[in-house]
Amino acid sequence: MRLLVVEDEMRMAHALQRGLQAEGFAVDVAGDGPNGLEMARHGGYDAVILDIMLPGLSGYRVVQTLRAEKNWVPVLMLSAKDGEYDQADGLDCGADDYLTKPFSYVVLVARLRALLRRGAPERPSVLTVGDLTLDPARRRVTSGGDEIVLTAREYALLEYLMRRPGQVVSKTELLDHVWDASVDTAPNAVEVYVGYLRRKLGRDLLETVRGAGYRLRQ
């Protein structure tokens, strides 16, 4: 397994490199954001360990750029920033995990192995279907570049469908995942909210598959 460590504190970077090499990994080191981005783009790495506060280009920008280029290499962010919003920002930018400094080396290796087991499936931080985009971090939906204002329930329904473009999703599945299971929901709630989305997004976007459910056209 080939790893890239992007860390500007060279003593820590080389300590990580030696430790991970002792675990059997092949490890390269980059000391700033621009070099880290170029190496991650072209190095064929199985995972990247990425600091946030980097010279030239922050770790946030590095992972955002990789995801925008559809590079799904697993990214474990390291940072001394331990606030809950800092961690949320890192994950929303497209990182797969976040570990605060100082950290346990044992935990770092365990989390890294977990990322490697998952591999690199597509997991865009912004969902796109045709000219429709949905940004979960900003809770923003646009169609053809124009922002669409949705209620919380409309947004949740659209997000669930956009994560399954082209797939037929049953009413039961939508009720289970979009509505609160502890609340008695009317059986026609899905039909009602699909109607709301059609009025805001266009009637042709959401297809009714008779007897099966709904499909978001790609």
Image (cartoon, rainbow, N blue to C red):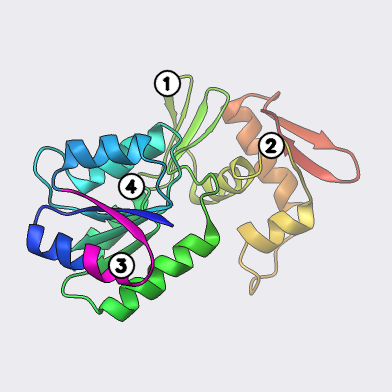
Q: Nearer the viewer, mark 3 or mark 1?
A: 3
Q: Nearer the viewer, mark 4 or mark 1?
A: 4
Q: CA distance from mark 4 to mark 1?
A: 21 Å
Q: Residue 64's quadrant in the figure?
A: top left
- Give the residue drawn at x 18%, y 36%: 34
Q: Earlier in the sequence, mark 3 or mark 4?
A: 3
In the image, the segment drawn in magenta is 17-30
Q: Nearer the viewer, mark 1 or mark 2?
A: 1
Residue 27 highlighted magenta (yes or no): yes
Residue corresponding to mark 3: 20
Q: CA distance from mark 2 to mark 4?
A: 32 Å
Is 56 drawn above or below residue 6 in the view shown? above
Residue corresponding to mark 1: 145
Residue corresponding to mark 2: 195
- Give the residue drawn at x 16%, y 54%: 7
- Residue 209 as seen in the image, left or right of residue 86: right
User: Mark 4: which amino acid?
Assistant: Cys
- Residue 172 as seen in the image, left or right of residue 81: right
